[in-house]
Amino acid sequence: MSKAFASQADLADKTITFEQLSPHCWAYTTEGDPNSGVIIGDRYIMVSDATATPAMARDLIARIRTVSDKPIKYVLLTHYHAVRVLGASAFVDEGATEIIASQGTYDLIVERGEQDMRSEMERFPRLFRNAETVPGLTWPTLVIGGGNPVRGEVPGRLTLDLGGVQVEVWHPGPGHTRGDTIAWIGAEKVLFSGDLVEYEAGVYTGDAHLEEWPATLEALRALEAEAIVPGRGAAMKGRAQVNQALDYTKRWVQTLFTAAREAAAAGMDLKAAMAHTRKSMDPVFGHVFIYEHCLPFDVSRAYDEAKGIKNPRIWTAERDQEMWASLQD
Ligand SMILES: [Zn+2]
């Protein structure tokens, strides 16, 4: 029997947790589904990652409204993936005026946002249950570039004052995508990492830069965070747990890429590379949520990168299905 494509057989609802991590920071976590973060200042609120659909975003807004009636002004897109960005219009309806992303993320939305939206809707039917509420692609209104503020350009690092709390936003380096952005609340040592960091859930690397990702994780470690909201998995509290999440992600990326390089060097085809990668990945990560969903995409990208393809190839709904079918026994 062939395995159901991606997460098409995963239809059981997740329990959502909304918890306070520090005086101004909250985690919205979902048992391995995409997480969001919330930073609540005296004047404004920022949300980090907008959920998959406006319907889902309204649940997040309802939870925020149990603890604050301040305006939700800023929505940060940590990267371009549909399950993170397509809920944004609900925040705009609620009054949000700035949708923030890096230049790299903006470029990826231009280049492949449409294909990614179609592909992800097929991969995750549960998350896109209310897909008809998505008005289309989410376009950033504030792009963090590498510009010079003296010349009136948007600088590479943005500091936002929410009232009593400052949030720094920047792109720490390539990893999960080439445009990943983080939110860092230095005074409270809380990090919202997006999918650059995961914990006890599949680390999706289908659009990743695997060789550079570990260095980006070390740049995050150097922040010495005391809490982190990963892209998937529980919020991690205390330095030891933060390092556990960083180590988990790094181990996934390095184990995967090592296997892919071995497969490419040995002249294996993609199917043989998949079997070879399973030998080192299954025993360590086989039990985690969406492992079987991620692995075919991950091996495809790792094998490409090992063969010298620098820019991840665009996934389309059609390429998804072809790849999946080609890796079945
Ligand atoms: Zn992602």
Image (cartoon, grey):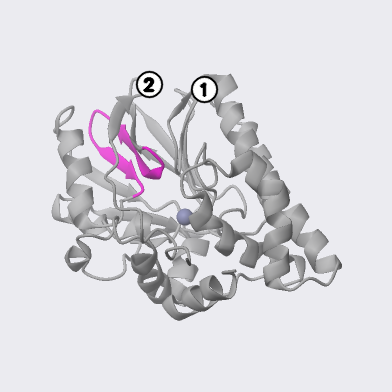
| Image location of residue 12, percent across then percent down | 29, 47
| Residue at (40, 71) in percent of width and height | 119
Residue 74 lies in the magenta-colored region: no
The image shows residue 311, relative to residue 128, as above or below, that is below
In the displayed structure, does residue 29 sit left or right of residue 205?
Answer: left
Identify the amino acid type marked 2. Answer: Ser
3D distance between C-alphas at marks 1 and 2: 10 Å
Query: Could you tell whether 45 is left or right of 237 in the image?
Result: left
Q: Is residue 19 visible?
A: yes
* 284 up-or-down from 142: above or below: above
Give the vertical position of 52 relative to 169 (above or below).
below
Residue at horizontal 82 percent and vertical 60 percent from the top: 262
Q: Amino acid at mark 1?
A: Glu
Snapshot quadrant of residue 8: bottom left
Q: Look at 42% across and 64% down and name the residue there.
A: 4
Residue 220 in view? no
Are circles 1 and 2 on residues that touch, CB within 8 Å? yes
Q: Position of residue 171 (x, y in %)?
A: 55, 50
Q: Earlier in the sequence, mark 1 or mark 2?
A: 2
The residue wearing badge 2 is: 22
Is 35 within the magenta? yes
> In the image, is 89 to the left or to the right of 259?
left
Where is residue 231 drawn, in percent x and y?
45, 44
Chain part drawn in magenta = 31-49
Q: Nearer the viewer, residue 161 or 239?
A: 239
Q: Residues within 10 Å of mark 2 (few under 14, many from 20)?
A: some
Residue topped by disc 1:
226
